[in-house]
């Protein structure tokens, strides 16, 4: 059977209507003055291994971890050293509810200070974002109510392309906060 472009377009459009996915957009409720790291892993010991990665990376870091178990009792496992951040991480992880996802809220450090250690945790598979921006998590929910984390909306849409004055501002800012050496 030979299809012309119009027939193929109509066929694809009909197929897309049949397999439409229920996609949810879940806003992460960020505690004041915190950053968030969202990722996936694959084992119940994730929450304890992430705890060790955090405390061994930055002295005086404050954090809370929520991890969505996806078998057995399917609980949100939680750890951390700041009760407010632990509670917020657990509640946000529960609201997202996607299997094997984790969410870490941090204070007294930046994601750049801990990302390498988190990525080295053997069971960590993916990091979706590490940010202080507003975050929305995009989730697929199947007919049984099970969820998969598809991605995140991290912050806002780009408004333009930087010009020379923006380059100068960026470089000055990085030196001001100590992430680059002064010229």
Image: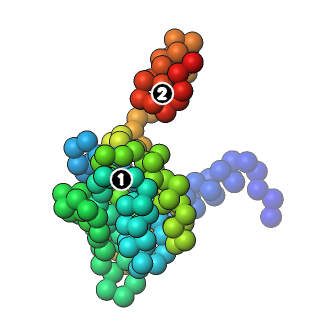
* Residue in the picture at 42% in, 61% down: 56
Residue 135, given in percent of the width and then of the height, sits at 36, 46
Q: Residues within 10 Å of mark 2 (few under 14, many from 20)?
A: few
Mark 1 lies on residue:
59
Colour mode of the rendering: rainbow
Residue 169, given in percent of the width and then of the height, sits at 47, 17
Residue 130 in view:
no
Q: Which one is nearer the viewer's eye here, 64 or 3?
A: 64
Q: Residue furthest front?
A: 59
Identify the image quadrant of the C terminus. Answer: top right
Residue 44: which numbered mark, if any? none
Quarter holding residue 100: bottom left
Residue 177, given in percent of the width and then of the height, sits at 41, 29
Q: Residue furthest right?
A: 2
Q: Which one is nearer the viewer's eye here, 45 or 13?
A: 45
In the image, residue 172 sits, relative to residue 110, either above or below, namely: above
Indicate left or right for 91 with 9 as reference.
left
Q: Nearer the viewer, mark 2 or mark 1?
A: 1
* Residue in the picture at 69% in, 53% down: 7
Indicate left or right for 91 with 164 as reference.
left
Indicate left or right for 87 with 35 as reference.
left
Q: Residue furthest top?
A: 165
Q: Residues within 10 Å of mark 1 (few under 14, many from 20)?
A: few
* Residue in the picture at 39% in, 52% down: 58
- Rounded to the nearest angstrom, the CA distance separating label 2 from label 1 is 22 Å
Residue 170, given in percent of the width and then of the height, sits at 49, 22
Q: Which one is nearer the viewer's eye here, 152 or 4?
A: 152
Quarter holding residue 73: bottom left
Mark 2 lies on residue:
174
């Amino acid at each position: 059977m030979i299809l012309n472009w119009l027939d193929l377009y109509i066929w694809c459009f009909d197929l897309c209507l049949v397999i439409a996915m229920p996609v949810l957009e879940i806003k992460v409720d960020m505690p004041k003055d915190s950053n968030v790291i969202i990722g996936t892993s694959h084992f119940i010991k994730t929450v304890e291994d992430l705890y060790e990665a955090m405390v061994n990376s930055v002295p005086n870091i404050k954090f809370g971890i929520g991890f969505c178990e996806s078998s057995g009792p399917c609980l949100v496992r939680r750890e951390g050293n700041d009760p407010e951040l632990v509670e917020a991480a657990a509640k946000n992880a529960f609201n997202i509810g996607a299997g094997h996802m984790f969410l870490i809220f941090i204070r007294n450090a930046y994601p750049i200070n801990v990302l390498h250690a988190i990525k080295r945790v053997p069971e960590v598979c993916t990091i979706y974002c590490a940010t202080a921006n507003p975050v929305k998590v995009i989730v697929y929910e199947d007919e049984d109510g099970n969820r998969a984390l598809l991605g995140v909306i991290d912050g806002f849409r780009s408004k333009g392309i930087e010009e020379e004055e923006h380059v100068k501002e960026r470089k000055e800012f990085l030196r001001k906060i100590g992430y680059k050496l002064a010229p």
